Image (cartoon, rainbow, N blue to C red):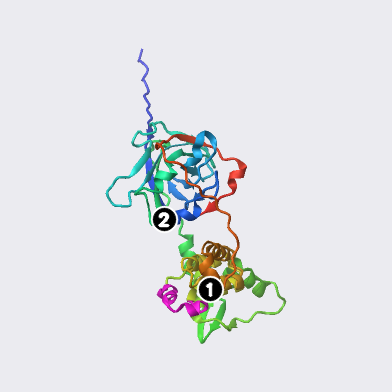
Amino acid sequence: MTPKKKNSTSSESVTVMVKGSHEFKVKGYSLVKGIGVGKFIASETFNVGGYEWAIYFYPDGVDTREHATVYVSVFVVLVSNANDVRAMFEFAMHDQRGQGEHFVLGHFNDTLGTEPHTLSKGEMWGIKRFYKRFHLEHSMYLIDDCLQVNCTVGVLPTTRDNSMTIEVPESTISTSFGMLFEDEQSSDVTFCVGGNKFYAHKIVLATRSSVFKSQFFCGTDKVDREILVNEMEPKVFKALLHFIYKDTLIEDEELHLSMSSSLASISEWYVSKLLAAAHKYDLPRLKLMCESVLCKHISIDSVAQILVISDCYDATELKFICLQFSAENLNETVAAGIGCVSVDSDATTPEPNEIEAESTSYYPSSDEENHLGW
């Protein structure tokens, strides 16, 4: 009798940590101190291990329990729509004197254990008692009213080893779409601006702008193939089309160089004219991009003119910051001729004592949705 052949199979589970870091600079710390317990400023999202994360910095602490309000708190939140993501974390504040004496707490240096935590969308891990506010404000970590918080995330995905895979390249649709920009051969409409011709596509413009949609497809009259645009410079209209096709600000040195010119002509700045164009053609994202550029140039000398521009083009975010800046620099802005709104600030300094730290997973309540983006 022939013995039965024994079949052997095997499989392998591979767990590899994927690590990544994000540096969050909190500029103007003194302006956010006092915003209230449980209120935070948020970093931009960053990707580690295929998941989106964000840093939440609480200048006045995350809650009132156990005298936690004398500390600043830091948390990292899982932004992606995912469940049961296992990860390890670490927070650090950089020694801005350049002597390498960084303050580090987390799993990777075993100061808060080495066990990973499991999070789902909207859940957070962090340190309520990260650093005593009094000590922070007199430390090498806060220089020129700027604080640098670094968050390292280590994601622990579990995958089955399989050598038979086919790699799918990342999508290039945005690049391909952008190639239509100024493509004369496929265009179906031409704009004449200050003696220059710009070739475009009605369906693309209508998809991006409600104004163009109404112009091309909501009327009964036939639209001319060639359209004259008055009261707009060619370079501004080109930047407008560049955004419509590529969703980015055009890389033009004049966009930045013009802002070094006289403050008496802020309305003549390239970015101010582009803001006006974005308002005219109902492009809210481009408006915010222009507002962001102008926001960086708010000063005692410029705030009056920038406020007028923001009001003229319904730039609400920029207007709010102008008014806030005016209120925080009341005497100077009054001398410049700007009325100010009152700002309530409660920024008391606690008594110094020992630096303590504790870590916790945290689930925000609904009233903590009131926060400031950074």
How busy is the neighbourhood of tag 2: few (under 14 within 10 Å), some, or many (20 plus)?
Answer: few
| Magenta span dominant secondary structure | helix
Q: Nearer the viewer, residue 8 or 113?
A: 113
Question: Which residue ends up furthest to the top in the rendered image?
Answer: 1
Reply yes or no: does residue 267 show up in magenta: yes
- Residue 312, relative to residue 136: is it above or below? below
Q: Position of residue 150 (x, y in %)?
A: 39, 47
Q: Which residue is mark 2?
A: 145
How busy is the neighbourhood of tag 1: few (under 14 within 10 Å), some, or many (20 plus)?
Answer: some
Q: Earlier in the sequence, mark 2 or mark 1?
A: 2
Q: Nearer the viewer, residue 60 or 318?
A: 60
- In the picture, which quadrant includes the N terminus? top left
Q: CA–CA distance between discs 2 and 1?
A: 25 Å
Q: Quadrant of residue 262?
A: bottom left
- The answer, for residue 3, to whether it is visible in the render is yes
Q: Amino acid at mark 1?
A: Ala
Magenta segment boundaries in residue numbering? 252-269
Q: Quadrant of residue 307?
A: bottom right
Q: Position of residue 234 (x, y in %)?
A: 50, 81
Q: Nearer the viewer, mark 2 or mark 1?
A: 1
Q: Which residue is mark 1?
A: 336
Label 2 sits on a secondary structure element that is: loop
